Amino acid sequence: MSDMPLEEFRKNGHQLVDWIAEYLKDIEKYPALSKVNPNDIFKRIPETPPQNGEELENVLIDVDKILMDGITHWNHPGFMAYFNSTSSGPGILAELLTAGLGINGMLWKTSPAFTELEKAMMNWFRQMVGLPKNYWGIIYDTASTSSMHAIASAREQLSLGFREKGMAGREDIPKLKMYCSEHAHSSIEKGAVTLGIGLEGIRKIPVNKNFEMIPKELERAIVEDLLEGSKPFCVVATVGTTSTTSVDPVEEVANICEKHKLWLHIDAAYAGVTAMIPEMKWITKGWERTDSIVINPHKWMFTPMDLSIYFTRKPEILKQAFSLVPEYLKTDQDDEVENLMDYGIQLGRRFRALKLWFVIRYFGVEGLASRIKNHISLAKEFAGWIDDEKDFERMAPVPFSTVCFRANPGDKSEKELNDLNEKLLEKINSSGKIFLSHTKLNGKFVIRLTIGSIRQERKHIEEAWQIIKNNGTLMTQI
Ligand SMILES: Cc1ncc(COP(=O)(O)O)c(C=O)c1O
């Protein structure tokens, strides 16, 4: 009744590492975007579980036979959709070690090295992005979770007894209001929904022509809500919005937050890592005035899913909101150490800091920064190709590595252009060589290309442009 014999484990482990190495070597043989139909993969898997065990080698064979058709290859250099987070060698190996160690860092005592490595990595990463020493960091799974904790902290800071009394059925509390731009990520709304603020508790502030929040509109909305008797409590500014990667004017937003005593949270999930690059320091303007900020190494720092970093100047408020210690989790060291379970909704925690340690040490800060910088310059080059092509049009500035564009032969209505670009995107993606995603900007269907993969080189961007241009030219002639 024991585990897999260690010799077998060793043999299968080597086989698995070889499989991954071959996969990464041959990744361009696969179509970037899976072509299966809904349920195709499910139908290949037996309806009932096996009663008796079998060799792991069989399972590995079935990874190829059953699953691979249904994998959309985020590691493929032609994957230029969404924010194309990719894993890297050191990150993948660290994930294996994480599972091997199998620790749970709920308390300092349940693995001192877990808590202390996370603390050390937060100290490193804080310096890498240039945040002052008074920022305290913690690792969560995703930016959605990080931002939810920011909103929860903002709510807790009001000291309206939410922790004890909740929010439902209370007539003694005003309607809470929070603010973000029209281009903020949907995770902010989800956070508000989760925390009882509700979608009606969020005001979406209009943006300027560059898709950046207009501070005057923010101020106007806050004053309007105050006059109505609502309680503004939190503003989310985005540094690198999801559709266009626009940057909200943090400094001006911070002025407004300070004036009205509102919690300021920055969502820099995608673009925050660029603060490592000296030329990109401009994005950090005003960061030292924010109450909290989220940056995701799993979006653009070659760290396998998932790893989101949350920094705050006010960890004591986070703890006040979430710490709840049942008898069985009390330890002798509670007065001397940080127990990470006190700083969020989860008790058990994966050892994510390990992969951050591996990735930062393997590439070094300069190695990471130079790769990210290269992506930015490739994106600028691609944007230049769009600008120079008469049947194409760029739809937003390119501060980072994402380019929004569409085909526009100049003789079509907006409706026809939307249809044309939707079809163009379908055609491009059906090539299997690249995978791009889309967004809508002011009602216009826009194609989005993001560069952020550790395996992307100039030749991949050139090849993508050829595919886009050829298909675009064919379609605009119809
Ligand atoms: C700006 C921004 N914030 C938050 C998120 C959510 O990220 P996660 O998947 O880590 O929750 C995204 C996802 O693309 C994003 O673009």
Image (tube, rainbow, N blue to C red):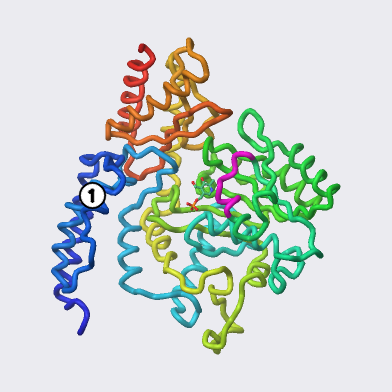
Q: Which residue is mark 1?
A: 68
Name the quadrant containing residue 89: bottom left
- The three-letter amino acid code for the residue at tag 1 is Met
Q: Is residue 183 magenta?
A: yes
Q: Position of residue 88 (x, y in %)?
A: 33, 52
Q: Position of residue 356 (x, y in %)?
A: 42, 60
- Given residues 306 and 17, the one toward you in this image is 306
Query: Left of 313 or right of it: where is 100?
Result: left
Query: Left of 390 or right of it: where is 281?
Result: right
| 76 over 115 or under it: above or below | above
Task: Specify start and end residues of the magenta stretch as a single range.
Answer: 182-190
Q: Is residue 286 magenta?
A: no
Location of the C terminus by quadrant is: top left
Q: Position of residue 77 (x, y in %)?
A: 31, 40
Could you tell me which residue is drawn at 52 percent across and 41 percent down? 242
| 151 over 368 or under it: above or below | below
